[in-house]
Amino acid sequence: MASPSELRTPQAVTSALIVKGALANVLGFPIGGTTIGTHYSEGHRVRLTVQIGQAPDPTETQFIQVAETINTILAANQPVHVFKLARHQAQTSYKNAMYNRHAVPESVTELTIAYIEKIAFSCTAEAVVASTGMVGAITINKTKFRSAKKELEIQYTVSTPSESGPAVLAVTKENDETLPSSEAISLLNSDTVRQASGGEGNEKRGNGGNIGSASGEGGQVVTPWEVEGDQEIDYDKLIKSFGSMRITESLVSRIERLTNRKCHRFLRRGLFFSHRDLTQLLDLYEKGTKFYLYTGRGPSSESLHLGHLIPFHFTRYLQEAFDVPLVIQLTDDEKFQFKQGLALEECHRLAYENAKDVIACGFDVKKTFIFSDLDYIQYLYPTVLKIQKLVTFNQARGIFGFTESDSCGKIAFPAVQAAPSFPSSFPVPLKGCLDMPCLIPCAIDQDAYFRMTRDVAPRLGCKKPSLIHSKFFPGLEGKGGKMSASAEQSAIYVTDTGKKIKTKISRAFSGGQETAELQKELGADLEVDVAYQYLTFFSEDDDELETIGKEYKAGRMMTGQVKGRLIELLTAMVKEHQDRRATVGDEILREFMRVRELEF
Ligand code: TYM
């Protein structure tokens, strides 16, 4: 049994502010002095009792509006502010708006007040989350109106996805810079029906990914559709807000021991930096349980760019090192739903084009099955349906930031990317081994899909898939983003000629100084230098990389020299890729994409 204080989680406490605010908005009663009590019980259930002026509409339409208002507030992911304020100052500015029915003892001279614009303004003794989207979903179970006392009791359940990571708490501010105006609170404390603000967040894709994104202070957004930041991506912050685990040196050593070979440079250099349940997967592997690998590509462009090679090169290493089967999903359906101006037939064609690039990364045909969703959906569909049944619109909105104006196709899609995480999707390739654990290598932008997947897994009676996440290979302009097919100018494609690569690298963002003299004096900033960053991804030679880093940083090497070395390396690597791709004829392609038993 959880103690009362354990039941008052920041999400639950914030939910009460939101539900009260939605009720006050729709039914039109003042927020001050109207909360009679809040009771938290097991199963994330909350019972809130408020004093309302008049009986609610007996047709229940008002409660439909309340539910809609709650959802709007959750989806808007509005900030929750917490202020510390001298009691006399609070009373002068805001009268009694922050109090509930239970008096705050006279001895308290400083109040802690939680504030959500147009929704809530209330003294709080408990921690609250930093924004409304972090609460998860709220489902109203029951309402009861006691007409004699004009008391309304509302019972509801809060479901915060268990994969959303630890709660990010609102920061308590001591200064009054952002205090709301007394007029704003007076309006909130009136008995008029008000319009809860959806806020601009309502339409923001990245913001809606409140759980899926780390947005806010540092200005970074990381979702499957958008990676953006004012500055360098803060990967520590992502680990915290996504609730994943850092890959430690000892985990890297363990992989080396288990596979009996030196780890891939991506692991040695911390470029694959985060994981979920990798340790458990390795425990099973050590006891003789083979896992399968699952990764994918959304075919939105004719060919892959260098960023896409990161998970595929790494997956190839994993396949070889652990000697395990691999499935690769080509989400032509996803690209059709999410990308404007792409015909379905074109997405399907691009899937086949991209498959050739994927094959050119060197996978073992006997152990690898590549499929287009359009072709393979009949095998996925039973698992897709079971997943879809377990995820409410509210949850999908909480994880991915969908809004009412998103198509049903988008909302239904995440289950399609989730399904291959379960062996039931591969009755033939995995030969009916329904208990096989799954490991998913990907860049961290895809994590939202798999938080949802891991959340439903136990309810499907399945193992949660494990994940291993990479950092982003940056675009040519550097800073705060990733190489992306939607920013064509920032990308180097595996189809680029040597000449094109040279031109692109020559104009890549440099952390070196403007003149040779300054460079000698000040040296380069390696963190932001695109050429150096690219070398950390693609140069196999640890010693050479270390020397270049040392010399360039100290100003003994010029930007031109570093770029020159990179051009040489990339030209050879891309040429090798192109040569391998040229050997991928229709027959090889068909074999990789044929539904057949894999060897393991
Ligand atoms: P897509 O096509 O956007 O990307 C394919 C894979 O490449 C990774 N990636 C990057 N990695 C490092 N640096 C970059 N700049 C960079 N850009 C993209 C992505 O994280 C991804 O691993 N919905 C997915 C397709 C998919 C999938 C999967 C991916 C379906 N099932 C399972 C991973 C695992 C997509 O559109 O990926």
Image (tube, grey):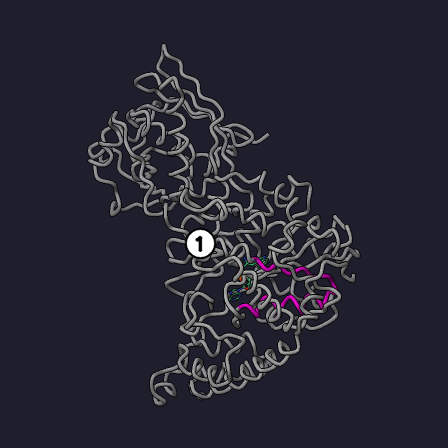
Identified by mark 1, the residue type is Ala
In front of the other: 363 or 267 = 363
Q: Quadrant of residue 373?
A: bottom right
**How packed is label 1: few (under 14 Cα within 10 Å), some, or many (20 or more)?**
many
Q: Is residue 384 left or right of residue 502?
A: right
Q: Is residue 180 left or right of residue 306?
A: left
Is label 1 in a helix, a strand or a loop?
A: loop
In the rendered view of the protein, which quadrant contains the N terminus? top right
Which residues, given as a range, are shown in magenta? 308-331
Q: Residue at x 47, y 79 (%)?
A: 531
Q: Main secondary structure of the magenta part?
A: helix
Q: Where is mark 1, residue-wise?
A: 214
Q: Residue at x 24, y 34 (%)?
A: 185
Location of residue 223 with respect to 505 vertically, above or below: above
Task: Residue 104: tell me if it is visible.
Answer: no
Location of residue 404 with respect to 317 vertically, above or below: above
Location of residue 46 in the rendering, given as x and y in whole percent from the top left corner: 48, 28
